[in-house]
Image (tube, rainbow, N blue to C red):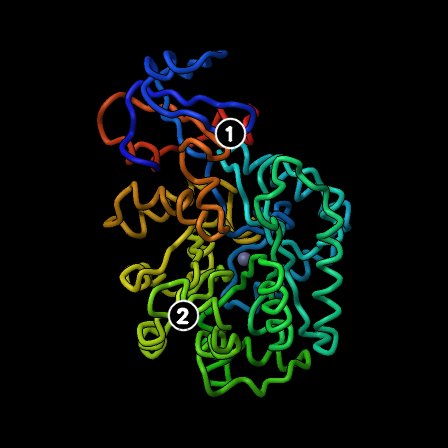
C-alpha cells in the first residue's frame, strides 16, 4: 500500500518497527539478522477493522434475518438478556482470536461493557470504544459517559502503544438511543482529550421514517419505551446529526481545505441519504470517515449503500464487519469479496485501501499502520499468491485463514 508491489521483496523488522523495505538482495546487503522466507506469498500490511462489536461474537447464527429493523433490536435484546459478564468475556476473547486468524491486526471495537475491558488482554492493536445508550435514562447522560471513561482508563496499558495517541473512543450508539446531551458530552471530551468518536447513522429505512416522518415501527417502538419523540418529524438523520454537532470549534474546522471537518467522527452505515442530504453534504463540504459493512448490510436488506456518490464527494470509506449478530465471520477478506460483488466497478486495490490505508486515517494512525513503510508498526500478514497476474485481484479474492500474522513485531 506504499508504492507498486515489489517482486522478491523483503521487509526488515527491528523490535516492533519496520526499518527497511525493498528487494531481498538489497535488504540483505544493508542489514543483518534472522531471515524468514515466506515463499510465494504476498506480504501485506495487517488489515484494520473499522467497525466491530466483539461483545456479540457468541450470537453468530442465533438471530435469523427479521422483516423489520426494530424486530431485530428486540431479538438481540432477548439474546443479550441470557448472557452473563463471563459469557461476554469469552465472546470478546473468541472474537479477537477469530479476527487475528483472518489477518486483522487492528480493530476499532465498540463495547457495551467498558467495565470488562480491564480484564481483557487484546492480542491485536485495539481501539476500545465505549458504546453508550441513555434512551431509558436521559437524565444520566453525563454519568454514563463518565463511568465508561473511568473503566476504559483502567484498561491494561500496552507498553508498545505509549505515545501513539489515546487508543480509545466514545460511541453514542445512534440518534434514536442516545440523547443530544450524550452526543454533546462525548464531543466535548473528544475535543479535550483527542479521542475517537463513532456512531451508527442513517442505517435503516425505519430510522429515516422515524426522524423524517415521525412514523413507522421504530418510531412506535421507541415511543412505547418512553423516548421523548420531539426531535422527530422534521429532519433526516443526517440533518439532525450535523446540526447536533453545531459549528466546528475554531481551529478544527480547517482540517479539510475550504470545508468543515469532523475529524474525530467515524460514521457507520449511511445507507439512507435523501437528495437533500447529498445537497447538504455538497454545500457544507463536511467530511467524516464512513464505514460500510457489506455483509451485515446484506443481512438487513438495507437500501443500497451510496458508495459512488459518497466517493465522488471525497469521503474516505472503510470496511468493517459489524457484529456476528448480523454477520457470519470476522474476516475482512470476506467483507472485501462481498463489497466487490456489490460494486464490481471498484478496483481491487481501491478495495484493499478500505481495510488498510483508509481505516488507518480514520484512527488517526496514517503514519503508523496500514502501509509497509520504514518507521511504521510491524503489523504484517502474508497470503499465498501466484507469480504475475492480477495481484490485487488475487488478494481481494483470498478466501481462508491467514497463517502468517505479525502484530507489533511478533509472529
Ligand atoms: Zn455496529
Q: Position of residue 121 (x, y in %)?
A: 69, 37
The alpha-carbon separation of the residues under discs 2 and 1 comes to 34 Å
* Residue where numbered disc 2 is placed: 260
Label 2 Cα neighbours within 10 Å, binned few <14 / some 14-19 / many ≥20: some
As drawn, the label of residue 373 is none
Question: Which quarter of the rendering shows the N terminus?
Answer: top left
Question: Which quarter of the rendering shows the C terminus?
Answer: top right
* Residue where numbered disc 1 is placed: 17
In the rendered view, tell whether residue 223 sits above or below residue 297.
below
Q: Nearer the viewer, residue 346 or 181?
A: 181
Instruction: Give the number of marks.
Output: 2
In the rendered view, tell whether residue 276 sits above or below residue 194.
below
Q: Is mark 1 within 8 Å of ligand 1?
A: no
Label 1 Cα neighbours within 10 Å, binned few <14 / some 14-19 / many ≥20: some
Q: Position of residue 79 (x, y in %)?
A: 67, 56
| Residue located 35% across and 49% down the image | 339
| Residue located 66% across and 38% down the image | 158
**Do the CB atoms of the residues marked 2 and 1 lie less than 8 Å apart?**
no
Q: Nearer the viewer, residue 367 or 167?
A: 367
Question: Helix or strand or loop: what does disc 1 sit on?
Answer: strand
Q: Nearer the viewer, residue 226 or 16?
A: 16
Q: Quadrant of ligand 1?
A: bottom right
| Residue located 68% across and 60% down the image | 78
Question: Helix or strand or loop: what does disc 2 sit on?
Answer: loop
| Residue located 40% across and 31% down the image | 44
Q: Position of residue 145 (x, y in %)?
A: 70, 65
Q: Position of residue 361 (x, y in %)?
A: 44, 50
Mark 2 and mark 1 lie on one chain; the one further toward the N terminus is 1
> Residue 113 sits in which quadrant?
bottom right
Residue 338 located left or right of residue 182: left
Amino acid at each position: 500500500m506504499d508504492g507498486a508491489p515489489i517482486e522478491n521483496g523483503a521487509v526488515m523488522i527491528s523490535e516492533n518497527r519496520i526499518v527497511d523495505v525493498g528487494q531481498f538482495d538489497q535488504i540483505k546487503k544493508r542489514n543483518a539478522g534472522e531471515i524468514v522466507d515466506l515463499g510465494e506469498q504476498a506480504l501485506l500490511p495487517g488489515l484494520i477493522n473499522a467497525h466491530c462489536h466483539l461483545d456479540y461474537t457468541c450470537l453468530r447464527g442465533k438471530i435469523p434475518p427479521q422483516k423489520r429493523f426494530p424486530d431485530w433490536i428486540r431479538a438481540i435484546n432477548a439474546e443479550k438478556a441470557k448472557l452473563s459478564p463471563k459469557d461476554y468475556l469469552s465472546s470478546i476473547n473468541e472474537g479477537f482470536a477469530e479476527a487475528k486468524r483472518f489477518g486483522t491486526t487492528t480493530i476499532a471495537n465498540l463495547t457495551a461493557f467498558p467495565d470488562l475491558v480491564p480484564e481483557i488482554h487484546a492480542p491485536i492493536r485495539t481501539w476500545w470504544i465505549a458504546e453508550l445508550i441513555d434512551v431509558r435514562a436521559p437524565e444520566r447522560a453525563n454519568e454514563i459517559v463518565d463511568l465508561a471513561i473511568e473503566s476504559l482508563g483502567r484498561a491494561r496499558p500496552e507498553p508498545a502503544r505509549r505515545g501513539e495517541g489515546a487508543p480509545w473512543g466514545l460511541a453514542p450508539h445512534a440518534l434514536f438511543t442516545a440523547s443530544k446531551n450524550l452526543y454533546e458530552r462525548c464531543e466535548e471530551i473528544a475535543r479535550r482529550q483527542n479521542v475517537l468518536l463513532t456512531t451508527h447513522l442513517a442505517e435503516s429505512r425505519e430510522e429515516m421514517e422515524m426522524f423524517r416522518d415521525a412514523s413507522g415501527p421504530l418510531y412506535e417502538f421507541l415511543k412505547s419505551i418512553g423516548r421523548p419523540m420531539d426531535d422527530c418529524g422534521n429532519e433526516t438523520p443526517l440533518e439532525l446529526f450535523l446540526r447536533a454537532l453545531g459549528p466546528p470549534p475554531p481551529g478544527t474546522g480547517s482540517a479539510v481545505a475550504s470545508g468543515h471537518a469532523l475529524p474525530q467522527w467515524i460514521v457507520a452505515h449511511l445507507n439512507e441519504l435523501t437528495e437533500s442530504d447529498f445537497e447538504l453534504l455538497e454545500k457544507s463540504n463536511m467530511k467524516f470517515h464512513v464505514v460500510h459493512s457489506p455483509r451485515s448490510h446484506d443481512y438487513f436488506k438495507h437500501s443500497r449503500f451510496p458508495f459512488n456518490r459518497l466517493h465522488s464527494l471525497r469521503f474516505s470509506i472503510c470496511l468493517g464487519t459489524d457484529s456476528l449478530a448480523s454477520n457470519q465471520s470476522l474476516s475482512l477478506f470476506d467483507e472485501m469479496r462481498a463489497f466487490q460483488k456489490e460494486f464490481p466497478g471498484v478496483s481491487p486495490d481501491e478495495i484493499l485501501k478500505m481495510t488498510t490505508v483508509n481505516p488507518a486515517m480514520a484512527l488517526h494512525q496514517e503514519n503508523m499502520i496500514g502501509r509497509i513503510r520504514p518507521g511504521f508498526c510491524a503489523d504484517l500478514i502474508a497470503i499465498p499468491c501466484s507469480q504475475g497476474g492480477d495481484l490485487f485481484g488475487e488478494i481481494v479474492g483470498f478466501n481462508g485463514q491467514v497463517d502468517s500474522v505479525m502484530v507489533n513485531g511478533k509472529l
